[in-house]
Amino acid sequence: MKNPFEYGGVVSGVAFCNRQKELADLRRAMENTEKLFVFSERRYGKTSLVRAALGKLPRKNFISAYVDLWPTDSEATFVAAVAKAITESMSSSVEKLMETAKKFFGSLSPSVSVDEEGKPTLAFGLAKHARIEPALEEVLETPARISSKSGPSVVVVLDEFQQILEYGSDRVERKLRSVIQNHRGVSYVLLGSRKHLIQKMVLDKNRALYRAGGHYPLRPIAEKHWQPFIRQHFVDAHKRISEEEIHRICEMTQGHPFYTQHLCHALWELCEQKATVTPEMIRTAVKVLLERESYAYTTLWESLTLPQKRFLKGLAAEAAGVKVFGGEFVSRHGLSSASNAQRAVEALLAKDVIDRDNGSFLITDRFFRLWIQSGQII
């Protein structure tokens, strides 16, 4: 039987845990052509969630373009990625792809080739000395052109949109502000996974995207939803797991979707049919996972300063919501002063090792947190 716990990619179907309210909220926002900033930590399942919501829209009434901005590193690659996503959302065959590409993005030198599997592959190119402004204008105005008059509603999803901060100019940010405000028949869903950067982009009055749309932070999946989900997957494989052991798993992963699925995946492999999950099995599964990551975690740990290490040890040891700049935390974990703690926080945020959480901070990699707790640190 295939392991039912999936992690590390887009999760769908029975492998997708709950998020029913979030799915309904996102679908409603898309149908109402709202502009929404969805943000959370990395690996929270934002892409799986938004793809599931897109899948619930009636195809005859909606065109949806999903753009992954993570591979982009410049305005030119942004333009190409958006043009490609819009074209592919409207066509599939080689002929139709080329026809659509030329109709909307003729100035971007579209080309179509066929890969080894016989599937058409679309590409766009900008001449080295071409001006970026007209091309940027063209791709970002296209969704409104498609949805105008009696056309279909359009949903544009920009995943990892904080990547636009890497382009060396705020042109994309400013143009996005303009289209988000003026495109009435288009829903924009902007997904981000570096919360401190996203909040800076949308909450800073001096930024172009300040208050440009609604904010939708994703929270961990509550244990009450993990309980039936995990239990049923074990039952379906003729395995048993108690409520107490599921609670233990959720405490370790703090309800984070990626780490919960990953730990359950390892545990499901360890547990034989007709057997019951034991605390020892959970300890073994955690040990296996931490050993796999040991080299990466050791390398990361060795790159940190002493105050950063002390801060992380404290954060791993304390309960959620601890006041890390308070005198007790600073004294208890050898940080000398609140300013030392502040410098450690700023450096760890920049490295994506920690993230903000309701007035406090958390270690983003839940297995790294367990590794620190396990005492394997140097």
Image (cartoon, rainbow, N blue to C red):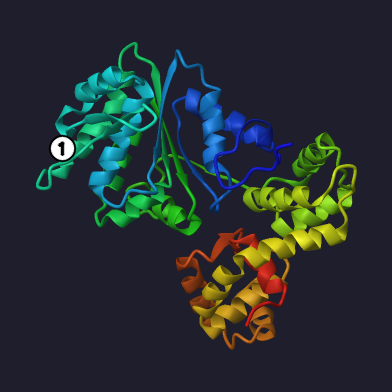
Q: Determine crowd level at label 1: few under 14, some 14-19, many 20+ residues with C-alpha closer than 10 A.
A: few
Residue 30 in percent (x, y) is at: 48, 27
At horizontal 11% and vertical 43% (from top left) the residue drawn is 130
Q: Is residue 183 visible?
A: no
Q: Tell me which corner region of the image, top left, top right, bottom left or bottom right, holds residue 291.
A: bottom right
Q: Is residue 300 left or right of residue 161?
A: right
Report the label total: 1
* Nearest to the observer: residue 143 or residue 371: 371
- Residue where numbered disc 1 is placed: 134
| Farthest-out residue, top | 150
Which type of secondary structure does the marked residue at label 1 adopt?
A: helix
Establish if 233 lies above or below 266: above
Establish if 197 lies above or below 374: above
Q: Tell me which corner region of the image, top left, top right, bottom left or bottom right, holds residue 20.
A: top right
* Nearest to the observer: residue 166 or residue 336: 166
Quadrant placement of the N terminus: top right
At horizontal 15% and vertical 37% (from top left) the residue drawn is 134
Establish if 336 lies above or below 227: below
| Farthest-out residue, left | 129
Q: Say what amino acid the circle numbered 1 marks.
A: Pro
* Nearest to the observer: residue 31 or residue 64: 64
At horizontal 77% and vertical 55% (from top left) the residue drawn is 249
At horizontal 69% and vertical 45% (from top left) the residue drawn is 221
Residue 294 in percent (x, y) is at: 61, 70
Residue 26 in percent (x, y) is at: 54, 32
Q: Is residue 129 left or right of residue 253?
A: left
Quadrant placement of the C terminus: bottom right
Q: Is residue 1 visible?
A: yes
Q: Is residue 244 left or right of residue 34?
A: right
* Nearest to the observer: residue 43 or residue 342: 43
Q: In this view, does 129 lie to the left or right of 55?
A: left
Residue 259 in percent (x, y) is at: 66, 53
